[in-house]
Image (cartoon, helix red, strand yellow):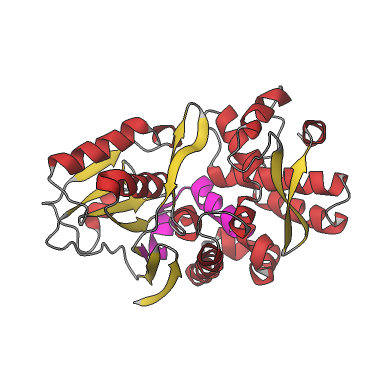
Amino acid sequence: MDSFSFTTVQGKTEVFYCDEPFLPPVGTAGGMYIADSNTAPIAKGARNFRADLPLVVIEAGEENKNFTSLVSILKTALDAGLSRNSVFIGVGGGLVCDLAAFAASVYMRGAKCKLVPTSLLAMADAAIGGKTAINFDGYKNMVGTFFKADEIYISPKVLKSLSEPEYLSGMFEIFKMGLLYSKDIYQVFRTQREKIFARDEGLCLDLVKKAVEAKAQVVSRDFDEKNERAFLNLGHTFGHALESVLNFSKISHGEAVAWGISKAMLLGKKLGLTDSSYADDVCAIIHSYSCIDVPVLQDKEKILLPMKKDKKNMGGKIRLILQKNICETFIYEASEKDIREVL
């Protein structure tokens, strides 16, 4: 089993690459599984699954990333007599990884957390780096903690079962990492579109590894997002706002981020901050993988409202992640007028 590890201010996280779905063994302190209605069968069929441990199944869908689901996990843990030495094992995509880790972080002020990401987005992004959250009051990831997973188990074979939108959702997050930190990833998206759509297993594994290791380096340097880690939000201020407006349905997280990246590129180009040919190239690549940039928004103020509540904002200013060129990233305080013009 191939593996690597990285260390943050909270300690060490080990990442394992597995040939098949694999659950971490549970010791004498006990534990529980958290999955959603799509990934529960994967959990039950995975190596090391124990039917004697509690399994909480959350209904699939971003709209269920909420307090109700969190309370269900915590009550199950309490009823099962779990302690802070017990392990919360999340088996699923971003919804499950965020919920399981959040529950572990607040149960008795911190239990153990191990994650088995089953979506490409979770493998390359959501499971890595210790951000946990639920959506609140119609806003994305508004309540959460920074809490690392002790172990992460990645099996690319499960990617074959993903729907096309979910697969591309993860690919867009990997593409984002390429824009930020890897010209190699960027070139793969430019030149190997057919292999990406074919879900070539070797290529997928290579892309996941590159994205995971790039993100691991960032969170090792800036775990609680005081500086550089904010760059990982490229496209997310626009994207999270779109998800909120659409009530966390109709569009995947990765598609929303890709839409957000295209808007960030257009804004940077308009302001003379982003290289024009680079911005055009990025937007063309995004459109070659998805037709998401359609006129879904009649009221631009609906997008601006959640953007004003974004966690990165300071002093009442909307702070966006923009780029001069590939791997040249910066934070910019944008005016509402300029944002409206690119929506």
Total marks placed? 0
Left or right of 42? Residue 30 is left
Residue range of the region highlighted in magenta in the rendering: 152-175
Which residue occupies 34% across, 71% down?
19
Q: Position of residue 67 (x, y in %)?
A: 36, 32
Q: Where is residue 314 in the image (x, y as percent from the top left)?
A: 66, 40
Image quadrant where residue 278 sits = bottom right
Res 16 visible: yes
- Any magenta on residue 200? no
Closer to the camera, 194 or 102?
102
Most distant residue in the bottom direction: 2
Which residue occupies 43% across, 58% down?
159
Q: Where is residue 15 in the image (x, y as percent from the top left)?
A: 39, 69
Closer to the camera, 152 or 6?
6
Res 296 visible: no
Which residue occupies 36% across, 63% down?
152
